[in-house]
Amino acid sequence: MNTPTLQARGLSKSFGPVRANHDISFEVEAGELLCLFGENGAGKSTLSACLTGLYPPDSGKILLNGERLRLSSAADAIRKGIGLVHQHFVLVPDFTVLENIVIGSERGAIVRYAEAEAKLRRICETYEIDIEPNALVEDLSVGEQQWAELLKALYFDAKVLILDEPTATLDIENSAKLFRIMDKLKADGVALILISHFLDEVMQADKVAVLRQGEMVGIKRTSETTPEELTRMMVGRDLKPQVREATPVGAPRLVLENVTVAGQGQVPALDSATLTVHSGEILGIAGVAGNGQNPLMEVIAGVRRAVSGRISLDGVDIGAMDARAIKDLGLGHIPDDRFIQGLVRELSIEENLILGDHRDSFARRGFLDFYKIRENATRLIKAFRISAPSPETLVRNLSGGNAQRVILAREKRLATKVLLANQPTRGLDVGVIEYIYMRLLEKRAEGVSVLIASSELEDLMNLCDRIGVLFQGRLMGIVETEKTTLEEIGLLMAGRPLEDAA
Amino acid sequence: MIEITPRSSAGWKAMLAAYVLALFLGLATSSLLILASGASVADGFGALYEGAFGSRDAIMQSLVAATPLVFTGLATVTAFRAEIWSIGQEGQMFAGAMCGYWVSLYLGGTTALIAVPVIIAAAMMGGAGLGGFCGWLKTRFQVNEIISTVMLNYIVIYLLSFLLAGGPWTAEGSTSYHQTPVLAENFRLPLLLEDVKLHIGFVLALIAAAACWIIIRKTPLGFEIRALGFNPTALRFKGVNVARTVLIVMCLSGALSALAGVSEIFGVNYRLRGDVMTGLGFTGIIVGMIGGLNPIGAVIAALLFGALANGSLYMSVLSDIPPSLVPAMQGILLLFVLGAAVLVRYRVRFGKRADV
């Protein structure tokens, strides 16, 4: 057998106390497709960054065609034949495709455009990529930009090509095309590494390396495994839903009927979502982040507008109301990005605790009611165990966990009827996560309807009465936690409809 | 190794020390310039001090010169606090003065008790209209406010030129001066003192500063202005109508700038003419910045700049210092003060870099 094109031997990388990668080894042969599979934060992106020279690994080594490889930068990796197709585009919008590929990567002072263009056209022809090298990147569709990104890697004759969730921005047709191109690359002897969450894609690889919490759980040939087994490996154990205390589920409270939110391309960001959350119920939304969770939460909270459909809270149509009016009906909203959407970092804790309610509960005769603001802050800081020297401490000086407690405190106070929690535990440590879940369960006991979106499947299984799964803006199905399995949800998350899973 | 790190907030002591140092260094550098011109440094600074603070009249004149700068400074503070980079103070000041004058044409012999408030209100509406227009362009069509305000400055200033250089508002027989006829007594801002031209505009300026401070610190609108400057997305997520807030801020900023025009034209010159206002709007931007985008700070900075402007006038008359050095000195002082304003936001450490 030949020497594998790329070998990783015991790669480790830590960021402070966080072990992003620990002792990771694998190999990819020429003409082979390896898939890196794992949850958010499992260490996939760090691994690809180590392989492409973005970070030096703390220990371990990388071998290219059997030779030790030391990468000083991303440009160095490209020159040595390791290409990366980014998940997020790194293209200059007002340059042409050709310029984006050539400038900054050609050596020497003079760029030979004609030669470069000819080469690029040849590549386009070989791989049937229909793109005009002289088109401005800003005039390209999102899908075409993905092709440009791919061309960038192909232009330098990559021997190893790493694709970081390349289909996230592609529709089904273009995804299929990408896989055809990948087949051709395999035939040409390129070693491919695909990073993906989608089981359908994962199963098209030759072998799958499963990562969990920075460690390699195992490598399986796809011919010798099943999607169910891979999901189980990804999550870590065979989960049994906790026995939930039966609380009487109340009347329907939050009702969505065929709610559609426009997306950036032709594909809607949220496609005809229909769901009901009863009072005293927690409905979980599972799915890989970016599959419509934000549009769903934001359209309910009044931050975005639906293009069609109906949203009602206790029978009141809230579809046309603004966020402030909806808040007044008793809705709290923990947004996806705590420091951008949820907090003003340069304001104090007490000021952040009144954000949104500053014209209502905390205003008196046209002025801010400072007595009430301070009293509210003192009470909430204590109740939610926010550790800070004073209510006047700026939020930017808080840790992520404490910052999230500020949002939780504020929104929980407002949520007398509905609480929306969008990825409320992302990036937080276990202690804070448990605390947040405890608070959400309290709300459930009070009869509040809780809608929580999370990519932590295991947590959703423990917390929720029912779980809906979003995939590419569509609600694939809503299942009762007691009657489902992790595998079933995993399959829904990867875009397989309910009938297939049975 | 010198390590420079931003610090969360500078104490008032550090700020005071930095500004005093900046003034000192600015004057020291200016003295080199005076020396190079062959004049006596002592004479020059003596005259500067004499002109700014040397007598009761000098002090009063300094306050008069500071008045419009307080207004344009406050206009800067309100806009910049919300991170709206309006450079339209100059044009809004002109627009204010022009609207005030235009209304006065219809007021005839009404008593000052009615005429002056009407003129002030009309001026503020003019400034607010111009500022609000740029705010509307920004929120409705995403027109960058820097571009729109700067361009409208030109339009308004040249509109006044047109009106005064032989246009309908030109005083008879004075086409070469580009000015209107003298304003009737009942249109002028009442004087606070009999003998000096310190007019009620100065009191209005102090009231405006207090009002700005209260709005920014104590009201829900001010809360939104502060939050808007840092993070408009969070405001939008919490249901605040960001476009409306931008519009209000731009109207407020425009109205404040307009008061600078009223104060110069109806309080000091008693004729509408462009040259006496030129630059006061732009200086207001500097005043607002040096004042740390704080209304009280802006008043202090305006008083400093008023004194400097007034004193340098005296200096150019009484000493051998060439008049052209005065704006150079102002520029040097400005550079040092701005440098200090940046410096107090950072902590400078000498020595080995700490491991992060």
Image (cartoon, coloured by chain):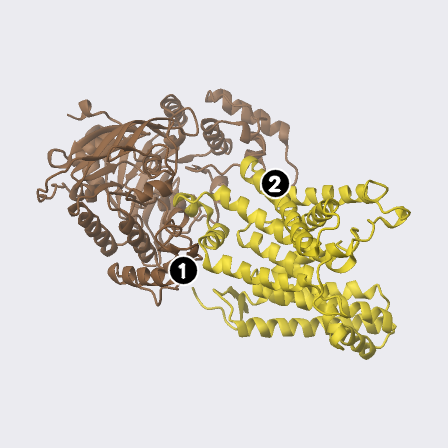
Chain colours: A brown, B yellow
Secondary structure at badge 2 equals helix
Q: Is residue B326 left or right of residue B151?
A: right
Q: Amino acid at mark 2?
A: Phe
The foreground one among B246 and A35 is B246
Figure quadrant of the N terminus of chain A:
top left
Q: Is residue A205 visible?
A: no
Q: Quadrant of residue A52?
A: top left
**Residue A2 coordinates in the image, percent (x, y):** 34, 34
Q: Nearer the viewer, mark 2 or mark 1?
A: 2
Between the residue at mark 2 and the residue at mark 1, the CA separation in whole angstroms equals: 33 Å
Q: Mark 2 — on which chain does it sit?
A: B
Using the image, determine if residue B82 lies above or below residue A383.
above
Q: Mark 1 — on which chain does it sit?
A: A
Q: Give the residue at the far right of this rendering.
A: B173
Q: Quadrant of residue A481?
A: top left
**Residue B138 coordinates in the image, percent (x, y):** 57, 40
What is the crowding at mark 1: few (fewer than 14 residues within 10 Å), some, or many (at least 20)? some
The foreground one among A297 and A22 is A297
Figure quadrant of the C terminus of chain A:
top left
Using the image, determine if residue B209 lies above or below residue A472.
below
Secondary structure at badge 1 equals loop
The residue under label 1 is A348
What is the crowding at mark 2: few (fewer than 14 residues within 10 Å), some, or many (at least 20)? many
Q: Amino acid at mark 1?
A: Ser
**Residue B147 coordinates in the image, percent (x, y):** 65, 42
The numbered dot on residue B133 is 2
- The number of numbered badges drawn on the structure is 2
Q: Quadrant of residue A454?
A: top left
CB within 8 Å, label 2 to label 1: no
